[in-house]
Image (spheres, helix red, strand yellow):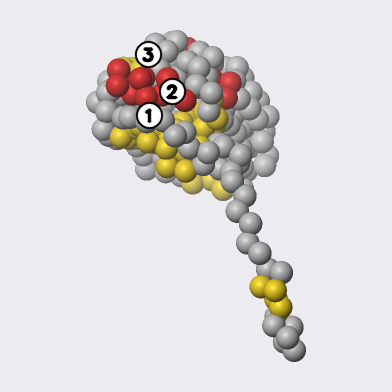
């Protein structure tokens, strides 16, 4: 430490502390590590296909990933072991024409995922079986898809789920038990910009902890106030 005589000014040494998780030195083409952090590395796979991406990601099996982002990829079906032995906190898939997610997609990796986003896809069928592996997911977002239905018990077993967003799709009236099994867990539900025409009695029975419900820009013909009676903690209701 050096100080200027007669002036109370000191030049303190600067120490660089490397993040706990740093980018690998080896090439993970076609993917790229953007940065490291104490929470994990951030990786993007851009404009590639499933086979090529699998090769790059296989080199990251010992790495903790804070974010894995797939964008502009030529992938219509997610299946197999592409994510099998990875450790991923946030998985974001965007601008990729995914139509189908097979039941085995999130085996092994599933419990590590806390946030899943699928944006601008062609997903037409809600992948209930595949999502059963996401036992620790807290945020599930599917925006701009071809979904037409939320199946019964679509989120069964996802006991840590706090936020669901299924927006900008063609979802019709949810089943009475579409959200079955989520009692006392979820705080945010966004279903805006769909084709919902009515809400069945009992649909929101799960919502004792729900703080936000967004049903804007649907085709609702009428609602009975009693349907919202279970929502004792609601702070924002957007119709």
- Residue 44 placement (x, y as % from top left): 38, 36
Residue drawn at (60%, 53%) of the image: 16
Dots 1 and 2: beta carbons under 8 Å? yes
The picture quadrant where one finds residue 225 is: top right
Residue 70 in view, yes or no:
no
Q: Is residue 61 left or right of residue 229?
A: left
Q: Secondary structure at mark 3?
A: loop
Q: Is residue 142 above or below residue 61?
A: below
Residue sticking out furthest to the bottom: 6
| Mark toward the viewer: 2 or 3 | 2
Q: CA distance from mark 1 to mark 3?
A: 20 Å
- Residue 43 placement (x, y as % from top left): 43, 35
Q: Is residue 217 left or right of residue 85?
A: left
Q: Secondary structure at mark 2?
A: helix
The picture quadrant where one finds residue 55 is: top left
- Among the two numbered marks 1 and 3 on one chain, the one whose residue lies closer to the N terminus: 1
Q: CA distance from mark 1 to mark 2?
A: 7 Å
Q: Secondary structure at mark 1?
A: loop
Q: CA distance from mark 2 to mark 3?
A: 18 Å
Label 1 sits on residue: 28
Residue drawn at (47%, 43%) of the image: 35
Label 2 sits on residue: 59
Quarter placement of the N terminus: bottom right
């Amino acid at each position: 430490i050096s100080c200027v005589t007669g002036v109370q000014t000191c030049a303190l040494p600067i120490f660089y502390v490397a993040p706990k998780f740093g980018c690998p030195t080896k090439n993970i083409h076609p993917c790229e590590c953007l940065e490291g952090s104490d929470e994990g590395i951030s990786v993007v796979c851009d404009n590639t296909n499933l086979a090529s991406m699998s090769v790059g990601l296989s080199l990251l099996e010992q790495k903790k990933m804070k974010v894995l982002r797939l964008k502009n990829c030529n992938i219509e079906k997610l299946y197999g072991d592409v994510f099998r032995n990875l450790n991923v906190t946030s998985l974001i898939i965007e601008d990729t024409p995914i139509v189908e997610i097979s039941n085995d997609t999130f085996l092994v990796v599933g419990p590590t995922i806390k946030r899943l986003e699928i944006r601008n896809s062609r997903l037409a069928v809600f992948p209930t079986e595949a999502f059963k592996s996401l036992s620790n997911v807290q945020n599930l977002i599917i925006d701009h898809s071809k979904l037409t239905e939320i199946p019964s018990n679509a989120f069964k077993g996802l006991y840590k789920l706090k936020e669901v967003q299924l927006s900008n799709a063609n979802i019709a009236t949810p089943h009475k038990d579409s959200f079955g099994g989520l009692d006392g867990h979820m705080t945010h539900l966004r279903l805006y910009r769909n084709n919902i025409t009515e809400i069945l009695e009992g649909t929101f029975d799960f919502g004792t902890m729900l703080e936000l419900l967004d049903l804007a820009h649907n085709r609702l013909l009428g609602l009975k106030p009693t349907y919202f009676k279970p929502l004792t903690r609601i702070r924002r209701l957007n119709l």
